[in-house]
Image (tube, grey):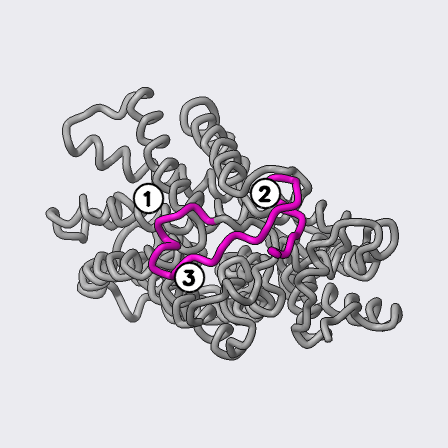
Amino acid sequence: MASTIPDPQSGSRAAHPEPQPPSDRAGRIEAHGIDHIPDAERHGHPRQLFSVWAAANVNYLSLVVGGALVLMGLTLWQALAVIVVGNLFWVLTGLLSISGPAAGAPSEVITRAIYGIRGNRVNNAIVGWLISVCYFALNLAAAATAAFSLVEKTGITAGTGVKVVVVMVIAALTLAIGVYGHAMIMKLYLPITLVLAAAFAVVAVSVFRHADLSYVPAEPLTGTDLLAVVLAGVALIGAGPLSYTTSADFSRYLPRTTSPKAIIGWTALGGFVPSVVVCSLGALAATAVDMTDPQTGLGTILPGWFEPVFLLALVLGTIAINALTAYSAGLALQAVGIRIRRSLSVIADGTAAVSLTLYGLLVSDFLDTVSNVLQLTVVLLGPAMAVYATDILLRRNRYDGPALTDESRDSPFWYTAGVNPAGALALAGGVAVAALCVDTLYTGPIAEALGGIDLALPAGIVVASLLYVLLTRLNGGPAPARA
């Protein structure tokens, strides 16, 4: 007799889907949503995670961010050092990913152990869904802008109707990957990584031919000003890996016995290596061209025949990163408590993101406003990742996957009225301290007292982690752990 579990995709109890041969999975829409993945359906190797994260990080945004560091006043070598340090946060992304095979569940469910059943719904609504949809919209707008230029090179004027069609086509391609799900991502992202690597290799040749390796700004930063810009740069680079608090979503199909070190290593390398390379190309390019308008600036040094290829690569890279975002946002929408199939939840997320994108591109500067607000996400994402990582270490990555699917009052993760005070208070404390230290859209009192030095990222992470350890131990330790 088939075992039954609550089916989060339909809201009813359903038998586990029959395991599919690996060769067939990519051609089928993923059956699982936020439900537990039984051991019989586990498959794959941790090295597959490298291409998943690499494809998502060989992108236009990394070029822009790398160039921004030089525009902020850093020397080339200072910018390169900041790029390396900021990308070390990929180790945390790798650490979070080991909880996927341990629980056989996505991050959106595993965090019930941290925040409680009800508390985790709030966490998923904000950290998992709202921020993901905003990032999806911003990335989609960036891809659309490159696509508009590509369309105009064919002699077609990018009017309103054309722009709408372009946005819809890019979104449809992105959502198709998200709807088909995990197996499709695993199958497509290696060839996508190779194609993007080849395209950016051409960019690298052109950039190195024109870059000034001894670049120093006319007025080099010193003292407090230099420290403030370095810390801001690390936060800017670190925001990338810190935004992936859902890395277990892509590792949860791996066998339970998979080496945690291998999972951490392949995930971290997949994010770190391409991000460092592409961000560094942006910094190097900024010593030769005006990176305030990267697309135009890079066009002056790239071969004429390559510009359409480069624009296509920008679109492809954005599709890769947004497909991951849409996939996790769909799981987050389910974890909020909305009874909807995973495939439909992905489409719902895409619809919201497309609406924001079209409104921002065609009606107002809404996306600029969203972009500014997202600069503050490090205030939330840093503490959120810190609490999650601390929980993994405290319970030694032992999670009871089936128990995590129980949302009733009898659940071991119901805690107090559905909320785990330790997780909620630790996150709130970390966010509060980070908000006092931030110097982005506003200057917090601590940052003001320090002369504009923004310590939001390290302060939020350290305070949230320490609070979670203290409150958890006062409560008798993390519970329950799988035997």
Measured Cα–Cα span from mark 1 to mark 3 = 26 Å
Q: Which residue is mark 1?
A: 293
User: Callout 3 environment at 10 Å: few (<14), some (14 to 19), or many (20+)?
Assistant: many
Q: What residue sits right under mark 3 in the picture? A: 53
Of mark 2 and mark 1, the one earlier in the sequence is 2
CB-based contact (under 8 Å), mark 2 and mark 3: no
Magenta segment boundaries in residue numbering = 1-30
Label 2 sits on residue: 9
Q: Give residue 152's position: percent from left, percent from top.
A: 20, 30
* Few, some or many residues within 10 Å of mark 1 (<14, 14–19, 20+): few
Q: In the image, what residue occupies the spot 42% across and 68% down? A: 44
Q: Is residue 6 magenta?
A: yes
Mark closer to the observer (2, 3): 2
User: Can residue 172 be seen in the rendering of this structure?
Assistant: yes
Q: Specify which label sits upstream in the sequence, 2 or 3.
A: 2
Query: Residue 268: x and y, percent?
Result: 47, 70
